[in-house]
Image (cartoon, grey):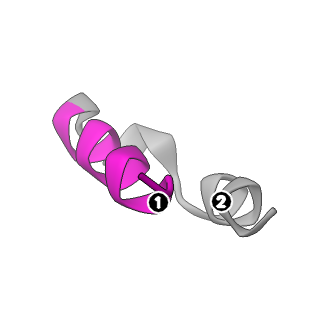
C-alpha cells in the first residue's frame, strides 16, 4: 500500500523513533 511506499522513500536514519511512532499512528486507519 501507500504506507509501504512512503516507508521506502523516507530515510529512517534521519527520523527519530518518536516521529516514526506518530507517523505510523497517523498513517494507519483507526
30 to the left or right of 21: right
Q: Residue at x 34, y 42 (%)?
A: 20
Q: Which residue is mark 2?
A: 3
27 or 18, nearer to the observer: 27
| Magenta stretch in the rendered image | 18-30
**Residue marked by disc 1:** 27
Measured along the vertical axis of the image, is residue 2 above or below residue 8? below
Query: In terms of image quadrants, where is residue 8?
Result: bottom right
Residue occupying image coordinates x 26% and y 30%: 17
Residue 29: in magenta span: yes
What residue is at 62 percent from the left and 53 percent from the top? 7
Is disc 2 placed on a helix, strand or loop?
helix
| Left or right of 1 in this view: 15 | left
Quadrant assignment for the N terminus: bottom right
Label 1 element class:
helix
Query: Residue 16: percent from the left, percent from the top?
Result: 23, 38
* Residue 2: mark in rendering: none
- Label 2 or label 1, whichever comes before in sequence order: 2
User: Residue 19: x, y in percent?
Assistant: 23, 46
> CA gap, disc 2 to disc 1?
7 Å
On whether residue 15 falls in the magenta region, the answer is no
State the predominant SS element of the stretch in magenta.
Answer: helix
Marks 2 and 1 in Cβ contact (< 8 Å): yes
> Which residue appears at 47% of the width and 42% of the height?
12
Question: Looking at the image, which residue sits at the far top?
Answer: 17
Q: Position of residue 5 (x, y in %)?
A: 75, 64
Amino acid at each position: 500500500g501507500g504506507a509501504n511506499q512512503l516507508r521506502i522513500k523516507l530515510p529512517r536514519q534521519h527520523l527519530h523513533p518518536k516521529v516514526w511512532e506518530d507517523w505510523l499512528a497517523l498513517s494507519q486507519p483507526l
